[in-house]
């Protein structure tokens, strides 16, 4: 029986000063849009890449200090568009949709005590929520697992391909194939109810937090 494509929502909440060409989601958008295993939607907060096969959804810019309210709105979009997997830009989360988070040295650095409090808080929340982590290198994976958090080693994978490389238009992206495989597994586990208890508690806490966001 043919498997239906996974409905993947990518968050476009990127730092306004960041080099978008270096972002793996942006660099691989063309391949992801053509991947038959994925149906890609993109939260367009501005500066979205143009990629064939990607559906863009207008969405408010990310506002620091209101991350819980942002999460509630993200989940509303996930529910409305029947999203099965959410792809985090590193600082945002839904409430009850499985999430794949890309982790590189920059993500770990902005969650260190020396970083700005709002950056650290939102990165830490994203790390806590994610169900899968795709790490840029083996040392980054080791640093993620050594953070003292209960991250199961099996949930943190090392990217098979340098994600700073742009996918060739005529070739399948090794990195993109890995993303698609992770999305299929997350969908299977979500349908089996593996994340349901965690999502119920997370949603309760985030709704409570939204009442005191500033």
Image: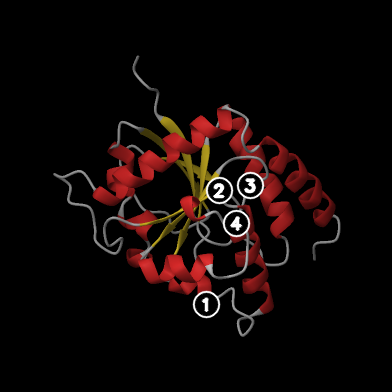
In the image, residue 200 sits, relative to residue 27, either above or below, namely above
Quadrant position of the N terminus in the picture: top left
Tell me if residue 19 can be seen.
no
Contact (CB < 8 A) between labels 1 and 4?
no
Where in the figure is residue 8, as x and y percent of width and height? Answer: 46, 39
Q: Is residue 1 left or right of residue 187?
A: left
The residue lying at 55 percent from left, 48 percent from top is 131
Q: Label 3's element? A: loop
Tag 2 residue: 131
Q: Earlier in the sequence, mark 2 or mark 4?
A: 4
Q: Earlier in the sequence, mark 3 or mark 2?
A: 3
Tag 1 residue: 109
Q: Is residue 17 left or right of residue 177?
A: right
* Residues at marks 2 and 4, CA–CA distance in whole angstroms: 14 Å
Quadrant position of the C terminus in the picture: bottom right
Which of the two discs, 2 and 4, sits closer to the camera?
2
* Residues at marks 1 and 4, CA–CA distance in whole angstroms: 16 Å
From the viewer's side, name the closer residue of 116 and 57: 116
* Residues at marks 1 and 2, CA–CA distance in whole angstroms: 20 Å
Q: Earlier in the sequence, mark 3 or mark 1?
A: 3
Which of the two discs, 1 and 4, sits closer to the camera?
1
Tell me if residue 76 can be seen.
yes
Contact (CB < 8 A) between labels 1 and 2?
no
In the image, residue 15 sits, relative to residue 31, either above or below, namely below
Where in the figure is residue 27, as x and y percent of width and height? Answer: 31, 57
* Residues at marks 3 and 2, CA–CA distance in whole angstroms: 12 Å
* Residues at marks 3 and 1, CA–CA distance in whole angstroms: 23 Å
Q: Residue furthest left?
A: 170
Number of the label disc, if any, that sits on residue 92: 4
């Amino acid at each position: 029986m043919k498997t239906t494509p996974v409905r993947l929502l990518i968050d476009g909440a990127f730092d306004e000063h960041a080099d978008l060409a270096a972002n793996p989601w942006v660099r691989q958008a063309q391949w992801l849009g053509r991947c038959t295993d994925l149906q890609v939607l993109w939260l367009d907060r501005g500066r979205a890449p143009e990629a064939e096969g990607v559906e863009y959804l207008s969405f408010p810019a990310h506002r620091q200090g209101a991350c819980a309210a942002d999460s509630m709105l993200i989940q509303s979009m996930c529910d409305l568009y029947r999203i099965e997997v959410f792809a985090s830009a590193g600082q945002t989360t839904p409430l009850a949709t499985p999430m794949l988070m890309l982790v590189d040295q920059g993500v770990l650095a902005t969650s260190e005590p020396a970083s700005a409090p709002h950056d650290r808080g939102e990165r830490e929340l994203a790390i806590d929520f994610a169900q899968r982590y795709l790490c840029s290198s083996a040392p980054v994976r080791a640093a993620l697992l050594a953070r003292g958090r209960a991250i199961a080693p099996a949930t943190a994978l090392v990217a098979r391909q340098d994600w700073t490389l742009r996918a060739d238009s005529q070739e399948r992206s090794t990195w993109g194939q890995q993303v698609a495989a992770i999305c299929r597994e997350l969908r299977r586990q979500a349908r089996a109810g593996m994340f349901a208890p965690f999502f119920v508690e997370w949603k309760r806490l985030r709704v409570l937090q939204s009442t005191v966001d500033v």
